[in-house]
Image (cartoon, rainbow, N blue to C red):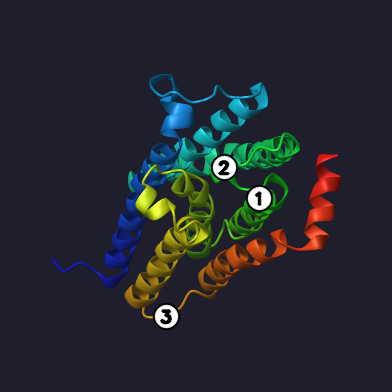
């Protein structure tokens, strides 16, 4: 019996989300293994505050929730998937609140990864939160339109890849800085967008807009971080 084109598209989409459900935790683990998940095996400073540790727990919970939601869709347990979606909204609020507070707290201590200056660097994690609010908010808005909902959720995951990618201890690629830790997620987003367009024979406009916003935010935040206006704003935030 021939498999319908619609069934093939759905199976392709499930495979894409399965790939990301595997790639997401692997990249996050690879980046934070030395400083968080396996820090007991490495000579690294202990976590500075309880809040930083809470941030690690919250973000790990978000990764676990995404993987669980992908599994539920693949197993066609849509009812539980939708129920967990409400928990996802609550967790998203915690992600943003804790992420913003921790970012400001770390900047006030003069702490930033990769030896970067703390106040300019503050633009990067804060804009991670801004883009997360936009993309996740869009996913919630389009929750009754599965095609748009799932694609925006995919982008929320890609939005959180740079912190893990930046901390992967491979000097040959880490030395490229933003070109590496923003470039890899951008390439992943573009590959998924191109494949989605080719497989469905049309461009999903919401997916394209979300991808464009995410990619554009990367150079924009780097430019903004070096401006005098941002320096004054960041200094006010940490004061």
Q: Mark 1 touching mark 2, by CB under 8 A? A: yes
Q: Position of residue 219 (x, y in %)?
A: 60, 67
Q: CA distance from mark 1 to mark 2?
A: 9 Å
The kind of secondary structure element at disc 3 is loop
| Measured Cα–Cα span from mark 3 to mark 1 | 38 Å
According to the picture, the residue beneath numbered tag 1 turns out to be 121
Number of the front mark, 3 or 1? 1
Determine whether the residue tagged by mark 2 lies in a helix, strand or loop: helix
Q: Position of residue 77 (x, y in %)?
A: 40, 42
Circle 2: is it few (<14), some (14-19), or many (20+) Cα within 10 Å? few
Q: Is residue 223 left or right of residue 205?
A: right
Q: Image quarter for residue 238? A: top right
Mark 3 or 2, closer to the camera: 2
Tag 3–tag 1 contact (CB < 8 Å): no
Dot placed on the residue nearer the N-terminal end, 1 or 2: 2
What residue is shown with label 2? 113
Q: Residue at 62% x, 64% y: name it.
A: 217
As displayed, is residue 154 above or below residue 187? above
At which x and y percent is residue 167?
46, 43
Residue at left offset 36%, top offset 48%: 23
Q: Which mark is residue 202?
A: 3
Q: Is residue 155 left or right of residue 199?
A: right
Q: Which quadrant would the C terminus be assigned to in this image? A: top right
In the picture, the quarter occupied by the N terminus is bottom left
Label 3, label 2: how far apart the Cα atoms are: 40 Å
* Foreground pick, 81 / 137: 137
User: Residue at left 59%, top 25%?
Assistant: 53
**Which of the numbered marks, if any, corresponds to residue 62?**
none
Q: Earlier in the sequence, mark 3 or mark 2?
A: 2
Q: Residue furthest top?
A: 40
């Amino acid at each position: 019996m021939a498999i319908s084109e619609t069934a093939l598209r759905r199976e392709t989409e499930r495979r894409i989300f399965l790939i990301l459900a595997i790639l997401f935790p692997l990249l996050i683990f690879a980046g934070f293994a030395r400083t968080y998940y396996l820090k007991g095996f490495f000579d690294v400073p202990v976590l500075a505050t309880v809040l930083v540790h809470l941030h690690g727990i919250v973000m790990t919970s978000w990764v676990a929730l995404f993987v669980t939601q992908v599994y539920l869709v693949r197993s066609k347990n849509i009812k539980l998937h939708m129920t967990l979606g409400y928990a996802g909204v609550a967790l998203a609020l915690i992600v943003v609140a804790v992420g913003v507070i921790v970012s400001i707290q770390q900047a006030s201590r003069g702490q930033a990864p990769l030896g970067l200056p703390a106040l300019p660097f503050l633009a990067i994690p804060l804009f991670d939160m801004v883009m997360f609010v936009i993309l996740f908010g869009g996913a919630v808005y389009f929750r009754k339109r599965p095609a748009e909902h799932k694609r925006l959720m995919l982008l929320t995951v890609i939005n959180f890849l740079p912190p893990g990618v930046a901390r992967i201890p491979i000097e040959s690629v880490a030395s490229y800085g933003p070109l590496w830790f923003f470039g890899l997620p951008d390439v992943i987003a573009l590959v998924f967008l191109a494949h989605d367009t080719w497989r469905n024979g049309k461009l999903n406009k919401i997916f394209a807009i979300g991808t464009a916003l995410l990619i554009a935010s990367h150079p924009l935040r780097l430019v903004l971080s070096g401006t005098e206006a941002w320096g004054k704003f960041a200094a006010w935030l940490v004061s």
